[in-house]
Image (tube, rainbow, N blue to C red):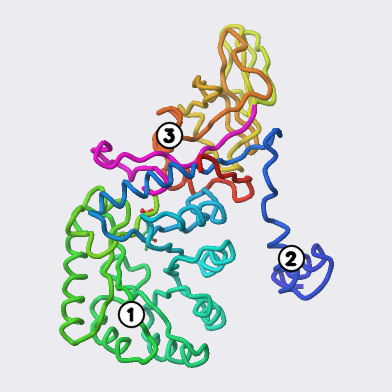
Amino acid sequence: MKRRAFLATSAALAAGGGTASAAGRAVAVASRPRAPNPAGFDPWIEVDAAALGQNARTVARAAGGRPVLAVIKNNAYGLGLDVAGPILAELDDIAGLAVVKAEEALALRDAGVQKPILLMGLADDGETEELVRRDVRLAPFTDNAPQRLAGITARVGRPVPVHLYLDTGMSRLGMPFRRAVPWIAAMAATPGIAIEGTFTALTEEDDFDGEQLERFRRVAAEARGRGAPLGRLHAASSHALFFRGEPALFDMVRPGLALYGAYPAGAREPERILLVPALRLRARVVRVERLDAGDAVSYGRRYVAQRPTWIATLPVGHADGYPRRAVEGCVVLIGDRPYRVIGAVSASHTIVELGAEPTARVGDVATLIGPDHPAVHPNTVAARAGISVYDVLMHLGQRLPRRAVGA
Ligand SMILES: *Cc1c(COP(=O)(O)O)cnc(C)c1O
């Protein structure tokens, strides 16, 4: 049996029979995280609604009051799409949400989000019809988009709202800027295509963003010269809000990271754009023990106690998204005291050094990532673990239960 067929059959068996696609749906439902048990020992994520609101206000102010399109891809940067989506969509400072996967756009509608949603990725014809029916904006960029969307608007019987995606040098998605003007004109001339916006993505390179912005402006001016309506222009992610300012802001901004309370690498002047991490990774202490001098900790025995030392074990590890390399200098808060991560971060466990006294108890709540102390700020965890802050957030386990706090 081919591997793909084997997997489909296994999934069907696991779901108790039925067609492969029905089994696929059943598996998707079965793999949703269960509701958190507040008294239990499993790790969880708290999503801070007040912090999201504060960051949205701060970002809107930094954007000079322009509309903010909140990027909420990759499970809302770890916060959980179902939890963070409705919270962000309720905020006056957020004009709409943007995702990269079709499934994310539909999941947001399923979660009750009514604000505009932009899909910044490609969907097949069947998905696209459903997306249009559910009022999701598309980001077309292919040569055949005018014909393809003309067919879809005819079949669905309603206009297709779009933001035209232009490639000004990222070479990832978008219509290459050198071919863009006639393509935009063709899009504009196609009945049923409603151009609400036109956008590009910057490479976030000091020497090149300016060139990309210039290309974007030039294409926009030429297309407008030909009478094409472009809607709102947008280019700025979080990085551009911090590093590019006014010339990159256009008619709307499109940040993700900053809304969740983390800074782009190298961000200065945090006093100008002061963000609050909107997420906490938490777990309860499951074991407190005393080591004798010479006792070692975890795989590889890389930590050896020099004197009698108390340690605590947390039931959360790298398979939950806490970085393996946190052992290279990260700390964990228990109560409000920081403790050093020691030994090794294993798949499901992290061990911290308490010191000469047993200052924590089984059941105490630990915070591995969050706003509560500078040492567990996501940017600090990223810096100390030597990884990107995007990885710290986006690699958090999909199955960790999320609960909203601070509403
Ligand atoms: C991810 C993404 C953003 C947001 O980027 P941040 O760095 O998280 O602010 C904006 N635009 C596009 C096209 C993206 O893929």
Residue 105 vertical position relative to residue 58 in the rendered view, above or below: below
Sequence-wise, the earlier of marks 1 and 3 is: 1
Residue 363 figure quarter:
top right
User: Is 40 positioned to the left or the right of 376 in the image?
Assistant: right
Residue 3 figure quarter:
bottom right
- Residue 262 magenta-highlighted: yes
On the question of residue 15 being in view, the answer is: yes
Mark 1 crowdedness (10 Å alpha carbons): few <14, some 14-19, many ≥20: many
* Residue 73 placement (x, y as % from top left): 47, 59
Residue at point 42%, 63% (across, down): 98
Asked if the residues shown at circle 1 and circle 2 are in contact, with their CB atoms under 8 angstroms apart, the answer is no
The residue carrying mark 1 is 195
Residues under labels 1 and 3: Cα distance?
Answer: 40 Å
Residues under labels 2 and 3: Cα distance?
Answer: 37 Å
The residue carrying mark 2 is 26
Residue at point 58%, 6% (across, down): 307
Which residues are drawn in magenta? 258-284
Residue at point 41%, 47% (across, down): 53
Sequence-wise, the earlier of marks 2 and 3 is: 2
* Residue 183 placement (x, y as % from top left): 29, 85
Magenta: main secondary structure equals loop
Q: Secondary structure at mark 3?
A: loop
Question: What residue type is disc 3 on?
Answer: His
* Residue 160 placement (x, y as % from top left): 43, 82
Badge 3 residue CB within 8 Å of ligand 1: no
The quadrant in which the N terminus is found is: bottom right
Residues under labels 1 and 2: Cα distance?
Answer: 37 Å
User: Which label was assigned to residue 377?
Assistant: 3
Viewer-closest of 235 and 177: 235
Residue 109 vertical position relative to residue 255 in the rendered view, above or below: below
